[in-house]
Image (cartoon, grey):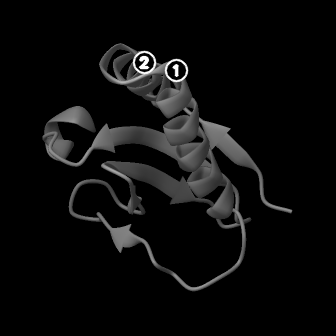
Amino acid sequence: MSKLRFTNRAVGDLTSIWNYTVRTWSVQQAETYYNMLMNACGGLTEPGPDICRHYDDIMPGLLGIKTGRHIIFHTISESGDVTIIRILHERMDVRQRLR
């Protein structure tokens, strides 16, 4: 079974998304959105069709999948383990944030 790992920056992104959603909408909405993001992250460890966009021009092996208004940037090792690099809003400057 593939492992799922999060970088410190990805954990920080999740925290920021949670805090923003609570301030803007509600705790209930934050829970719903957080669960959606986490389910999408977990789904990356399961076999299936490659529905991710390749971002090799930014970083070799970098993949991204759009979930809600965010893109989950990740890599997959040869053994199939998934590392979540960042979770960024679709309007953010991806190149700058992934440096």
Residue at the (78%, 60%) spot, across then down: 2
Left or right position of 13 against 98: right
Residue at the right extreme?
Answer: 1
Q: Quadrant of the N terminus?
A: bottom right
Comparing 31 with 81, the one in front is 31
Report x, y in % for residue 92: 16, 39
Mark toward the start of the polypeptide (2 vs 1): 2
Picture quadrant of residue 45: bottom right
Residue named by callout 1 = 27
Q: Looking at the picture, which amino acid does disc 1 mark?
A: Val
Residue at the bottom extreme?
Answer: 49
Q: Quadrant of the C terminus?
A: top left
Residue at the (31%, 40%) spot, across then down: 88
Callout 1: 10 Å neighbours few (<14), some, many (20+)? some
Q: Which mark is residue 46?
A: none
Callout 2: 10 Å neighbours few (<14), some, many (20+)? some
Report x, y in % for residue 93: 13, 41
Left or right position of 67 against 78: left
Question: With respect to residue 8, does 72 lie above or below?
Answer: below
Please indicate, yes or no, whether residue 99 appears anywhere in the rendered image.
no
Question: With respect to residue 54, does 93 lie above or below?
Answer: above
Residue named by callout 2 = 22
Tag 2 and tag 1, C-beta contact below 8 Å: yes
Comparing 91 with 59, the one in front is 91
